[in-house]
Image (spheres, rainbow, N blue to C red):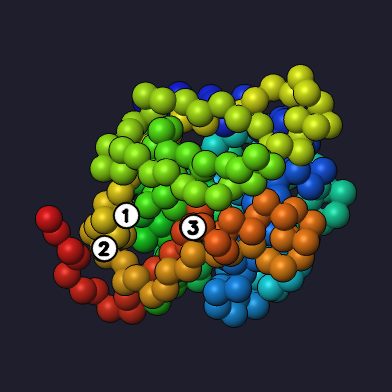
C-alpha cells in the first residue's frame, strides 16, 4: 500500500475521529499517550516547531497553549486540516496548518527551519518510515530534536496480538504473536472508540492500515537517518485516568501499548549508521 491509498483511509476516518475525540472518546490519548509525551518533552517555549500528522490539532494546540511553542502543523487528510483550521479561526493561537504527506514533508517546508518536530501516533501508520525520518532530519536545525509516539511494536505487533480479558471484560494478559512479521498495509484494522460506540452503536468504524515493524527496525531507521537516540519512554495511564476508566490499569499491570522516542540531530555532521 502506498501513501496515497493510506491517506484515503485517514481521510475517510477524519470526520468521525475529529468529532468523537473532541467529545473525550479517545481515553488512551487523553490519559496515557499525551500526558506521557509531555512528561518527557524538553522546554520548547519560544521555539519554532512542526507537528507532523497533526490530525484535528489537539496536541498542536497544547504545544502552543501549555508549552509556549510557535507551531506549524500538517496532515495528509484534508478533513483533519479543515477541523484544525476551523478551531484556529474560532480560537486563534497562530498555528499554520497545511495538507501534506508526512513522507514528502520536506517538499512543503524549508530545510533547517525548525527547532523541533513532534509526531503523535502517526509514524506507525505510514508505508515508508525511513523517508519520513530523512525528511524530518532535513527540516531540523543542527541540534534540533524529533519526538514521536507510536503503537508499541513489542506488544501491539500484529492483528493476531490481543488482550485476554476476565469475566468482567478487564484486560488481564497480553498475547503477542507474529512479532517479526513485517506488514505493509495488507491488513486493515477496523475499530471504534469504545465510548463512541456507547454514544452511537451504529458509528462507522475507523479503517487503519497496519504497517508493523519490529523494535530493532525502528531503531535502525532512526540511526540510519543520522539521529542520536536521546530518550525512550513507555507511558502508563495517569492516576486520574485510572479513576475515570479503571480498564486503563492494564498499562501499569500488564504492558505498555505506546512507545515514545526523542531523537536529536547532531550539531555537527557525523557518519550515518549503515547496514
Q: Element under label 2?
A: helix
Check the picture and name the quadrant holding the C terminus.
bottom left
Q: CA distance from mark 3 to mark 2?
A: 26 Å
- What residue sits right under mark 3 in the picture? 255
Visible residue check, residue 24 = yes
Foreground: disc 1 or disc 2: 1
For label 3, count other residues whose C-alpha is less than 10 Å away and answer few (under 14), some (14-19) or many (20+). Answer: some
Q: What residue is at 26 percent from the left and 43 percent from the top?
A: 180
- Furthest toward the left, the residue is 275
Q: State which quadrant residue 216 falls in.
A: bottom left
Q: Is residue 145 left or right of residue 247?
A: left
> Is the residue under label 3 in contact with that under label 1 (CB below 8 Å)?
no
Q: Is residue 181 above or below residue 89?
A: above
Q: State which quadrant residue 193 falls in.
A: top right
- What residue sits right under mark 1 in the picture? 215
Q: Is residue 224 above or below residue 159?
A: below
- Furthest toward the top, the residue is 202
Question: Which of 155 and 190 lies nearest the eye of the viewer?
Answer: 155
| Among numbered discs 3 and 2, the one appearing first in the sequence | 2
Q: Element under label 1?
A: helix
| Among numbered discs 1 and 3, the one appearing first in the sequence | 1
Q: Element under label 3?
A: loop
User: Residue 227: percent from the left, percent from the top?
Assistant: 31, 67
Q: What residue is at 42 percent from the left and 73 percent from the top?
A: 231
| Among numbered discs 1 and 2, the one appearing first in the sequence | 1
Q: What residue is at 72 percent from the left and 68 percent from the top?
A: 239
User: Residue 226: percent from the left, percent from the top?
Assistant: 27, 65
Check the picture and name the quadrant holding the N terminus.
top left
Q: CA distance from mark 1 to mark 2?
A: 13 Å
- What residue sits right under mark 2 in the picture? 223
Amino acid at each position: 500500500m502506498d501513501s496515497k491509498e493510506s491517506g484515503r483511509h485517514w481521510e475517510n476516518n477524519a470526520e468521525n475521529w475529529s468529532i468523537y475525540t473532541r467529545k473525550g472518546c479517545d481515553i488512551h490519548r487523553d490519559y496515557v499517550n499525551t500526558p506521557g509525551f509531555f512528561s518527557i518533552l524538553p522546554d520548547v517555549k519560544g521555539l519554532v516547531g512542526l507537528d507532523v500528522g497533526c490530525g484535528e490539532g489537539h496536541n498542536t494546540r497544547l504545544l502552543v497553549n501549555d508549552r509556549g511553542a510557535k507551531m506549524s502543523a500538517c496532515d495528509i487528510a484534508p478533513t483533519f486540516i479543515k477541523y484544525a483550521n476551523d478551531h484556529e479561526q474560532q480560537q486563534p493561537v497562530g498555528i499554520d496548518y497545511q495538507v501534506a504527506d508526512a513522507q514528502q514533508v520536506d517538499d512543503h517546508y524549508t530545510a533547517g527551519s525548525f527547532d523541533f518536530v513532534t509526531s503523535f501516533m502517526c509514524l506507525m501508520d505510514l508505508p515508508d518510515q525511513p523517508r519520513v525520518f530523512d525528511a524530518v532530519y532535513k527540516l531540523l536545525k543542527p541540534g534540533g530534536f524529533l519526538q514521536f509516539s507510536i503503537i508499541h511494536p513489542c506488544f501491539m505487533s500484529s492483528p493476531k496480538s490481543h488482550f485476554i480479558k476476565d469475566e468482567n471484560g478487564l484486560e488481564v494478559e497480553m498475547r503477542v504473536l507474529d512479532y517479526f512479521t513485517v506488514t505493509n498495509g495488507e491488513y486493515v484494522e477496523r475499530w471504534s472508540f469504545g465510548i463512541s460506540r456507547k454514544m452511537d452503536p451504529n458509528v462507522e468504524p475507523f479503517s487503519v492500515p497496519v504497517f508493523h515493524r519490529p523494535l530493532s527496525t525502528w531503531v535502525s531507521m532512526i540511526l540510519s537517518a543520522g539521529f542520536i537516540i536521546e530518550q525512550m519512554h513507555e507511558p502508563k495511564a495517569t492516576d486520574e485516568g485510572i479513576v475515570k476508566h479503571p480498564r486503563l490499569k492494564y498499562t501499569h499491570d500488564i504492558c505498555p501499548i505506546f512507545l515514545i522516542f526523542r531523537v536529536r540531530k547532531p550539531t555537527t555532521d557525523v557518519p550515518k549508521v549503515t547496514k
